[in-house]
Image (cartoon, rainbow, N blue to C red):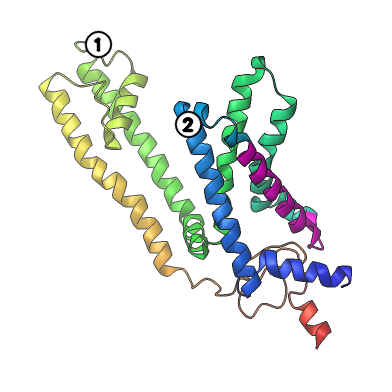
């Protein structure tokens, strides 16, 4: 088997999901990702960490080695590996394995806190689930299309909580220790408008409670507006491509069913098929 044929075969297994080998690879990888995240969660439990202190490091290194080999093979079978390395999933792949290797060089009691913070980055490997969730692309597309409208809405909300906080400061500022400044009152307005309701700041006067009731009711509209914007964009969005073909040059996915060239790097998508025919 020539090197070019080997790269083509690896690309079919690693990046494609419509072939039997590609499906099996995705399923195995998905199971490993879930197991690695479960290990991270269990290791954060003190009693589990003490009881299985000898097992967790072995499992972590096992997962790290497997994901490292997978990352290297992804780069190896692409014509333009650097483009994939700079992509979103390429960066996530690195974040999934880097903390374990950094722990070798940062070992020591004085770096214990830093190591624990770095090891928490392993949870990023769950984002690799995006390789298997085609529906996620629809949500992402709708979020991007909704960005201008949501931005305007957020600016309006910032102005609204500033006005409400200022009014509440005028109403409660002289008699209520909870509202000693406008920023503190704005904090109360944000907590109340978003229906979080911590309860650490509460108005005492009748007028202040009346204003709080209005803000609480208004909070339901605040929740509904961005949800409606995104939902409308999802309803208006076109169907996503049904194929899972990945460019053999840069590894990018999401091409139209009738696409001939990659939308990201411009390489021919079916070069290998044409050469074989």
- Residue at image coords 37%, 41%: 156
Left or right for 159, reference 201: right
Q: Which of these two is toward me, 55 or 33?
A: 55
- Label 1 to label 2, Cα distance in Å? 45 Å
Residue denoted by label 2: 48
Which secondary structure dominates the residues rendered in magenta?
A: helix
Dot 1: few (<14), some (14–19), or many (≥20) neighbours within 10 Å? few
Tell me which numbered mark, 1 or 2, is placed earlier along the sequence.
Answer: 2
Q: Quadrant of the C terminus?
A: bottom right
Query: Please, is residue 73 above or below residue 172 in the view?
Result: below
Label at residue 2: none
Residue at x-position 45% and y-position 27%: 47
Residue at far right of view: 2
Q: Position of residue 220 (x, y in %)?
A: 24, 45
- Confirm whether the magenta stretch covers residue 50: no
Q: Image quarter for residue 10?
A: bottom right
Please provide the residue range marked out in magenta. Answer: 58-81
Quadrant for the N terminus in the image: bottom right
Q: Quadrant of residue 8?
A: bottom right
**Residue under numbered circle 1:** 177
User: How far across and down, in percent of the image, does residue 147 sit?
Assistant: 48, 52
- Left/right of residue 177 with respect to residue 226 in the rendered view: left
> Is any atom of residue 254 visible in this view?
no
Q: Nearer the viewer, mark 1 or mark 2?
A: 2
Q: Position of residue 78 (x, y in %)?
A: 78, 62
Taking 107 as reference, is 155 left or right? Answer: left
In reply to whether residue 71 is colored magenta, the answer given is yes
Residue at 67 percent across and 40 percent down: it is 61
The reply to whether residue 17 is in sight is yes
Residue furthest to the bottom: 277
């Amino acid at each position: 088997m020539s090197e070019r044929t080997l790269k083509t075969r690896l690309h079919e297994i690693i990046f494609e999901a419509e072939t039997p080998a590609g499906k099996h690879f995705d399923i195995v990888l998905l199971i490993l990702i879930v197991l690695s995240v479960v290990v991270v969660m269990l290791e954060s439990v003190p009693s589990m960490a003490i009881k299985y202190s000898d097992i967790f490091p072995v499992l972590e290194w096992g997962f790290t080695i497997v994901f490292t080999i997978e990352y290297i093979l992804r780069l190896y079978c692409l014509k333009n590996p650097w483009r994939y390395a700079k992509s979103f999933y390429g960066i996530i792949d690195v974040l999934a394995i880097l903390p374990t290797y950094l722990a070798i060089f940062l070992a020591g009691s004085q770096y214990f806190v830093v190591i624990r913070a770095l090891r928490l980055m392993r949870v990023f490997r769950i984002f690799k689930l995006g390789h298997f969730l085609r529906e996620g692309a629809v949500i992402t597309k709708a979020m991007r299309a909704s960005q201008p409208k949501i931005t305007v809405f957020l600016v309006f909300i910032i102005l609204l909580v500033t006005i409400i906080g200022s009014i509440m400061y005028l109403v409660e500022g002289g008699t209520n220790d909870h509202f000693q400044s406008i920023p503190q009152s704005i904090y109360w307005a944000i907590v109340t408008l978003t229906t979080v309701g911590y309860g650490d700041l509460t108005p005492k006067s009748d007028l202040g409670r009346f204003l709080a009731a209005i803000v609480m009711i208004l909070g339901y509209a605040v929740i509904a507006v961005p949800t409606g914007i995104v939902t409308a964009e999802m309803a208006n969005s076109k169907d996503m491509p049904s194929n899972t073909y990945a460019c053999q040059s840069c590894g990018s996915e999401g091409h139209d069913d009738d696409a001939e060239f990659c939308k990201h790097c411009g390489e021919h998508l079916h070069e290998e098929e044409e050469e074989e025919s």
